[in-house]
Amino acid sequence: MPRSWHPFQRIEQFVREYTAGLSTRDFRRLFDRDAMHAYAVLTREHSREPEPRGLGRWLFRAKLTFLGLSYKLTPARRLLFALALVIFLVGLLQNPLVVSVGTKVRISLDFSPLPFVVSVLALTYLLALELVDRIRVRDELEVARELQADLLPDEIASIPGYAFAHSYRTANEVGGDYYAVTPLPDGRVALVVGDASGHGMAAGLVMAIANATLKTGLDLDPSPERVLALLNRTLCRTGTKRTFMSAFYALLLPELGILEYVCAGHPFPLLRRENGEIEELGEGGLPLGLHDALPLKCHKVAMRPGDLLVLYTDGLAEAVDAQGGAFGYDAIRGVVRGGGLPATVHDRILAAFDRHVGEEPLHDDLTLLVMNRQPPLTAHQEADPPAPPSS
């Protein structure tokens, strides 16, 4: 190919890299959903007055947007932002609009480029400063995400007679969901699934506090009432009224399948019996962290061979599609009713979830933990274990 084509190839490559990952759906979202969300966030601290009607509505919204943008900046950057806008307006006023009325209407706009260039450079510089701050925060969030990932199980310890499948998704870099399956020295197994209020960094901090408290509680006394009472006191003393956490905590005796549990404001886990019947484990109650004297009632149920237990957070049921319809608890029950191995049920639930939400982003963290008590091996299975795969 002639050498003269090389610059065009570089331009084409640059355009391809610059627009990588761009979709028409994402571009349209810039001017509808993202714009509405940005306006709501920027103006929520200044929109105390009722919105007027007619032309005054747009002037009112412009004022709120300006104030919202300005007061989100530091004082120095706020001044630079205001000066950039003033310089831009000065450039426009040097040569105002010219309107000719006659057989034809002519509108012309002619102004000196210097104020325009200065205002654009000032706004670009301001944008660069804000982007650098965002990159620093993102890097810190990435470190927090890695630290949080270390608190969640990559793999669940092998428990004879039981099988597990689990997954975890976050709405932001840092999430507030928590789950663990912890074998205890006396042979019992502690199961916990929790969901801190909100999501993001604040919820992640609550989750880290819960993790440390739960481990301490397991060392002191692993009974459900004692562990959740300790966690409730910790959250009440270290948080605010908006710092709370729903939790389901259970203590499993593997040999007998006995499950002692407390459900504190958490979505009720689903216990599918081998015959297809579904039981909900829990009753109405408050989350942890709201009151010091929180009543916690312990229940007991037996998991028989072939039974399946599904634990999840409300991010699964409450996720919405493009029309705002929630995935729903009935949909989860419908998938669980079909039964199967933990991995099969787990994957079916997430497949149905993904079909429902489509390309909509997660607005809340999602945790799913599925386990079953396996039927005992027959004499033939014990005598003839499966042969290892040939190399």
Image (cartoon, rainbow, N blue to C red):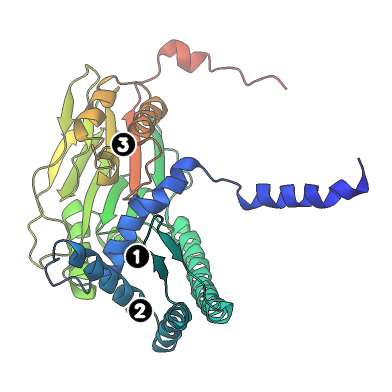
Label ID, residue 254? 3
Q: Nearer the viewer, mark 2 or mark 3?
A: 2
**Which residue is under mark 1?**
212
Determine if residue 271 is in view: yes
Looking at the rendered structure, the number of numbered marks drawn on it comes to 3
- Label 2 and label 1: CA atoms lie apart by 40 Å
Identify whether 113 is placed above or below 145: below
Q: Is residue 184 visible?
A: no
Q: Nearer the viewer's eye, disc 2 or disc 1?
A: 2
- List the single residue furthest toward the right: 2
- Of the 4 image quadrants, the one containing the C terminus is top right
Q: Please state if 310 lies on the left or on the right of 293 as rendered.
A: right
* Residue at the spot of label 2: 70
Q: Nearer the viewer, mark 1 or mark 3?
A: 1
Residue ID at (24%, 49%): 249
Callout 2: SS: helix
Helix, strand or loop for disc 1: helix
Q: Quadrant of residue 57?
A: bottom left
Residue 79 place in picture, x, y as percent = 41, 87
For the residue pair 248 and 39, the one nearer the viewer reads as 39
Q: Residue 207's x, y, as percent?
A: 33, 61
Q: Earlier in the sequence, mark 1 or mark 3?
A: 1
Q: Residue furthest front?
A: 103
Q: Residue furthest top?
A: 380
- Which element type, helix, strand or loop, lies under badge 3? loop
**Residue type at numbered disc 3:** Pro
N-term mark: 2 or 3: 2
